[in-house]
Amino acid sequence: MSVVTPFPQPRDRQPLATFDRQELQRILDLYGRMVAAGHWRDYGLTFGPQAAVLAAFRRTAERPEVRIEKHPLLRTKQGAYVLVSEHGVVLKRGHDLQNVLAPLERRLMRLVGQ
């Protein structure tokens, strides 16, 4: 006999973690400047119940060079924002997105200055 699987109900779903408009504007502004400098070529967005992630790639077929993550459940403890390197090492963690993106801003200044 066949088994009927019920559709998930709206009350069963967990809310997704997302970037708000200002956060996404700041991140995509940085992304655009890194693309203009020739450093990044692609990005991917993932929204899940635990975290929202923007991954920036040098080339599409590689691992992401950097991941910018937002974990809303950690906002009162370690900070909601995390900057993760290509190898999975946490580069920066904090409560303010601007401070977390600072290492990438400094690298962009060095790339343009060369």
Image (cartoon, rainbow, N blue to C red):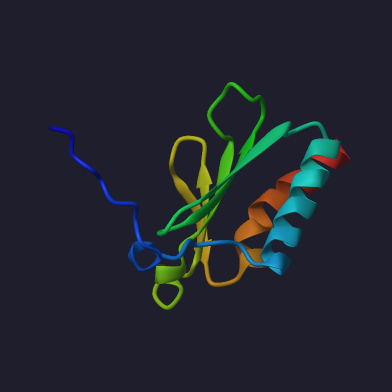
96 displayed left or right of 78: right
User: Against 25, is 109 above or below?
Assistant: above
Image quarter in which the N terminus is found:
top left
State the residue in front, 103 or 27: 27
State the residue lying farthest toward the front: 1
- The image shows residue 51 at horizontal and vertical percentages of 46, 57
Image quarter in which the C terminus is found:
top right
Identify the residue at horizontal 60%, vertical 61% (top origin): 100
Counting the numbered discs, the total is: 0
User: Against 76, is 28 above or below?
Assistant: above
- The image shows residue 9 at horizontal and vertical percentages of 36, 62
- The image shows residue 17 at horizontal and vertical percentages of 50, 62
Which quarter of the picture shows residue 57? top right
Identify the residue at horizontal 67%, vertical 29% (top origin): 58
State the residue lying farthest toward the left: 1
State the residue in front, 79 or 46: 46
Which quarter of the picture shows residue 50? bottom left
The answer, for residue 1, to whether it is visible in the render is yes
Identify the residue at horizontal 56%, vertical 24% (top origin): 62
Identify the residue at horizontal 43%, vertical 41% (top origin): 88
78 displayed left or right of 68: left
State the residue in front, 83 or 42: 42
User: Against 28, is 55 above or below?
Assistant: above
The answer, for residue 78, to whether it is visible in the render is no
28 displayed left or right of 113: left
State the residue lying farthest toward the top: 61
State the residue in front, 21 or 41: 21
- The image shows residue 10 at horizontal and vertical percentages of 40, 64
